Image (tube, helix red, strand yellow):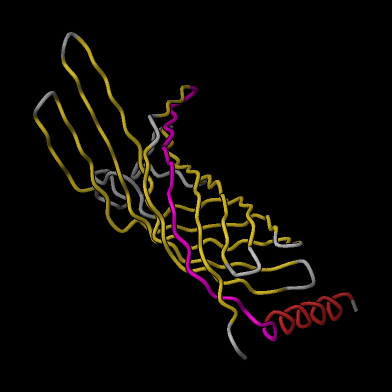
Amino acid sequence: MKKQISILLAAMAFMTIASAQPELGLAGGATLSNYRITYDSESESFDSKLGFTVGMVVNLPAGRNFAVQPCLYWTQKGMKEKQSDMGTTYKMSLINNYVEIPVNFLYTRNGFFGGAGPSIGFGIKGKWKYQLDDEKETESVNFGNDDEDDMKGLDIGANILAGYKFPSGFLVMLNFNQGLSNLVPGETEGAKLKSHYFGIRIGYMLKTKK
């Protein structure tokens, strides 16, 4: 009996979402990202790196004040570092480009919305930049799971966001994304590398016709 009730409730929820009128939109903005590396009990972060994000947003109403929001973004994550010693300056920066798919579960009221959900990112390309005084060098990031790779390309995370949608359809939203995957490839030997970033986006939602 409980199984039948669960199936019935799931079917009703699916029909509600499927019959709901979705909202489609575009959004873009900036990211402020970093990576944290941990080895045994020691942890280190670098300086945050500014990047950009742009993509598509879909709002699927799932009740009076609830919605499911799958998104597809091109998102930049990175870090940077600068050290000076004995008159020598060393700079390093990393910028990685991901195709990111967050699925947020939202509570909405009077234009305000907030929620959370999982995200999955696929590393597409990245670039290391090194500078020692006036000498510069650039290298591509190798994504993969082997020891000779720089980091894993799959980055699973948790996303929290809040925002406001104006009656005109324009919206602004803030989010924080914490990477959960250990991005150290191959044999980790106790080392962990995880991403995180803050994002701010503005966009426009256009309600589609049935």
Q: Is residue 203 above or below residue 89?
A: below
In the image, residue 39 lies at what x, y percent? 43, 27
Q: Is residue 107 left or right of residue 152?
A: right
Q: Residue furthest top?
A: 86
In the image, residue 159 lies at what x, y percent? 57, 52
Q: Residue furthest bottom?
A: 210
Magenta-colored span:
18-41
The residue lying toward the viewer, choosing from 121 and 55, is: 55
Q: Is residue 169 above or below residue 119?
A: below
Q: Is residue 93 left or right of residue 160?
A: left
Residue name at image x 53 percent, y 61 percent: 102
The residue lying toward the viewer, choosing from 99 and 61, is: 61
In the image, residue 113 lies at what x, y percent? 69, 58
The residue lying toward the viewer, choosing from 21 and 128, is: 21
Q: Is residue 12 above or below residue 185?
A: below
Q: Main secondary structure of the magenta part?
A: strand
